[in-house]
Image (cartoon, helix red, strand yellow):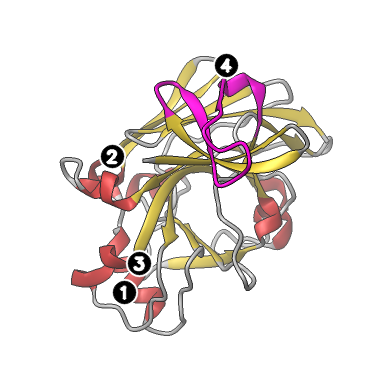
């Protein structure tokens, strides 16, 4: 099932995809059907009782590491992100006026479904609640060190669209190859600029969950952004960027001057 969070009629709602429309759930409007263009799309992440942990991977595809002229890492190269960076489907990402290189990053987002601590790789999928599409923009002008993205590179408000859906883990796991065989691609103004497949990750989803849970507790609602393949290009105000992952949907985002 594909879950969404939306704003409609002055309130936030949960919804599910139903025959090309949104069906509202868990409110006085439960059962009401809405068209996609009637609502404001929000990040499809349920509220959590504590601060949400967001972990992002750098250089997790060998071709992207090569694209940036770096050797592939020997263990996961990760950094933390603030949740305020997230925005929803069809939202706007601000590009600062002075920057010279701001590019998209189409990424598989893994949402933790239950508390994970010292998880073994063989059991890792049991701790996933769902999957989504993320576009984790990077501003290369602000990069202090290719291996240590600073706050202005990866933690800017509006820099990480996510959605439109949170797809139940069980639905993704039953696909041929599961989450580690999903085609992904990005278009800028309708032109394909990035193509890849999650099978090309250096560290797959079970490896990442085993690795992170070995030294930190992952809580329900935490998010792991798993990196991007090669094919990233600079984007300008007015560009419409669509990041699409097989079985998860197409996330639409527009860049504006900011």
Is residue 229 visible to us here? yes
First in sequence, mark 2 or 3: give its number.
2
Q: Are marks 3 and 1 in contact (CB under 8 Å)?
A: yes
Where residue 140 sits: x, y (%)? 65, 47
Q: Earlier in the sequence, mark 1 or mark 4?
A: 4
Q: Position of residue 31 (x, y in %)?
A: 51, 33
- Front disc: 2 or 4: 2
Q: Which mark is residue 116?
A: none
Is 97 located above or below residue 200 in the figure? above
The residue indicated by pointer 1 is 210
Q: CA distance from mark 4 to mark 3?
A: 33 Å
Q: Which residue is mark 3?
A: 208
Q: In the rendered image, which residue does mark 2 sit on?
A: 182
Q: Which residues are magenta?
A: 18-40
Residue ID at (71%, 47%): 141
Q: Residue at x 36, y 48 (%)?
A: 168
**Secondary structure found at label 4:** loop
Which residue, given by chain and number where applicable, does mark 4 sit on? Answer: 189
Q: Residues within 10 Å of mark 2 (few under 14, many from 20)?
A: many
N-terminal of the pair, mark 2 or mark 4, is: 2
Horizontally, residue 161 falls left or right of residue 59, namely right
The answer to whether residue 172 is left or right of residue 240 is left
Q: Is residue 113 above or below residue 139?
A: below
Tell which circle, 4 or 3, labels the residue nearer the N-terminal end.
Answer: 4
Question: Alpha-carbon neighbours of circle 1 within 10 Å: few (<14), some, or many (≥20)?
Answer: some
Considering the numbered disc 1 on the image, is that residue within a helix, a strand or a loop?
helix
Distance of mark 1 from mark 2, alpha carbons?
21 Å
136 left or right of 245 in image: right
């Amino acid at each position: 099932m594909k879950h969404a969070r939306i704003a409609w009629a002055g309130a936030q709602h949960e919804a599910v995809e139903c025959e090309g429309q949104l069906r509202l759930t868990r409110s006085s409007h439960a059962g009401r059907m809405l068209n996609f263009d009637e609502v404001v799309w929000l990040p499809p992440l349920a509220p959590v009782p504590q601060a949400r942990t967001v972990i992002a991977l750098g250089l997790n595809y060998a071709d992207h590491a090569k694209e940036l002229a770096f050797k592939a890492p020997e263990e996961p190269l990760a950094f933390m992100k603030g949740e305020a960076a997230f925005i929803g489907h069809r939202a706007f990402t601000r590009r600062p006026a002075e920057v010279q290189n701001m590019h998209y990053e189409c990424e598989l987002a893994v949402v933790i479904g239950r508390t994970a601590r010292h998880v073994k790789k063989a059991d890792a999928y049991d701790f996933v609640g769902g999957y989504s599409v993320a576009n984790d923009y990077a501003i290369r002008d602000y990069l202090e060190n290719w291996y240590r993205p600073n706050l202005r590179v990866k933690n800017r408000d509006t820099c990480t669209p996510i959605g439109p859906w949170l797809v139940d883990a069980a639905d993704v796991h039953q696909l041929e190859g599961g989450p580690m065989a999903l085609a992904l691609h990005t278009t800028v103004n309708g032109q394909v600029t990035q193509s890849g497949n999650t099978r090309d990750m250096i560290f797959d989803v079970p490896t990442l969950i085993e690795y992170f849970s070995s030294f930190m507790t992952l809580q329900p609602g935490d998010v792991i952004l798993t990196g991007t393949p090669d094919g990233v290009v600079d984007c300008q105000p007015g560009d419409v960027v669509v990041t699409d992952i097989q079985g998860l949907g197409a996330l639409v985002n527009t860049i504006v001057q900011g």
